[in-house]
Amino acid sequence: MSCSVVSPQHRSRVIFATSWLNVAVNVLLSCLKIAIGVLTNSIAVVSEGVNNATDIATSVITMVGTKLSQKRPTRKHPFGYGRIEYLTSLLIGTLILLTGIELLKSSVHLLIHPEELKVTVVSVVVLVISVVVKLAMGIYTIIQGRKVDSKALVAVGEESRSDSIVSAVTIVSIVIFLVFGKSVDAWAGIITAFFVLRAAWEVLKDTIAALLGQPVDKELADELYRVIRSTDGVINAVDMALHNYGPNAYTGSVNIEIDHKRTLGEIYEVIHALQLRIMHEYHVTMVFGMYAVDKDSPTLRGLREDVVRFVRDREHIQSCHAIYVAPNGTDLYCDFIVDYDLRDWEKVQADFREYIHGIHPEFNVVLTIETEFV
């Protein structure tokens, strides 16, 4: 499956169009809810209106962050300003968190000091409409955000979808009051606050993970591996590391195995063309490290089979590569890729040395163990 990369221009258009649509919808809903909440003396309805007003701010912040992230690189920031979008998501998550805390405080106060609840058919109708509209907007915004890899847009969509659940809870509280004559408005407000706080946690968790560093989209990594491995002169590609500097902005490195018979001049033209292709098609600035491999050597073929046999029997070792015998004929180099569940790396080192010495006592084993970065 081919991995498509969205152009910056198309991405920006999608983010701005979706954000403006969210602004328009939330302005309308906010005004209606606050007005009806004041008329009916319902803290839950007023709280929802305030929450919709917050949604307006988050959409505006998303647009501002997207615009700032498109600034050209400077001497102080040579990798550009793409990570501003992550700061935007962090700000949105913080605003949602503060809103949830304020709603919780107001609802607890109402629980301690109850007030009479006034309900009208109009308020119920508006809330039902709000559930449908916010749910539709939330799903649409999340889909658009994921299409263009915008964490801020996804955050706005998650908040909108959470708001639809909040409105449904408020409707339930009104129905309970109409049927049983008992106000559970304060409890509805508390439940509402927890939904808002949960949305804040989801946004902050994902954003902080992006800022700390996390694996890139597996589809992109798999596609890059496919392109590199299918290049003439490349036997294998391993140890890929991609560093994210904002959506669709990566620098990376990868080690490739090449036929030792190819000259540096021959392989340069191939790798240079590959670098340009990866940069233009996938927006990744890739640096290549190289291993020279004698794939026709019977000795190395036998060694590779021995090493693969060892790897196949070990649960936490994912693959091996860079099998190489130094010109002195005694140093055997090899790299293992292991998963993150492996705790005792020293034992793997010792077991492999013992295994190799058992069948090839002439070799001094130089083993490198590492984890996959993508």
Image (spheres, rainbow, N blue to C red):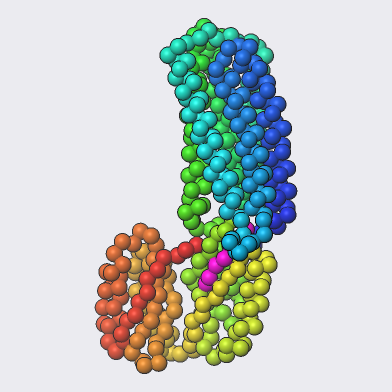
Q: Residue at x 71, y 44 (%)?
A: 16
Against 143, residue 336 (above or below) is below
Q: Position of residue 192 (x, y in %)?
A: 51, 25
Against 31, residue 280 (above or below) is below
Residue 273 in view in this figure: yes
Residue 164 in view in this figure: no
Q: How many callouts does the rendering have?
A: 0
Against 22, residue 245 (above or below) is below
- Give the residue at the far front of this rendering: 76
Quarter assignment of residue 117: top right
Q: Which residue is drawn at 61% across and 83% down?
A: 268
Q: Which residue is drawn at 56% across and 44% down?
A: 89
- Camera-nearest residue between 89 and 302: 89
Magenta span contains residue 133: no
User: Where are the magenta residues, as a range?
Assistant: 248-254
Say which quadrant the N terminus sits in: bottom right
Q: Where is residue 26 in the image (x, y as percent from the top left)?
A: 67, 30
Magenta span contains residue 249: yes
Quarter assignment of residue 287: bottom right
- Camera-nearest residue between 244 and 143: 244
Most common secondary structure along the magenta stretch: strand
Left or right, residue 207 beside residue 341: right
Q: Position of residue 217 (x, y in %)?
A: 55, 57
Left or right, residue 9 beside residue 348: right
Q: Which residue is drawn at 62% across and 51% down?
A: 149
Q: Position of residue 81 (x, y in %)?
A: 61, 56
Against 111, residue 91 (above or below) is below
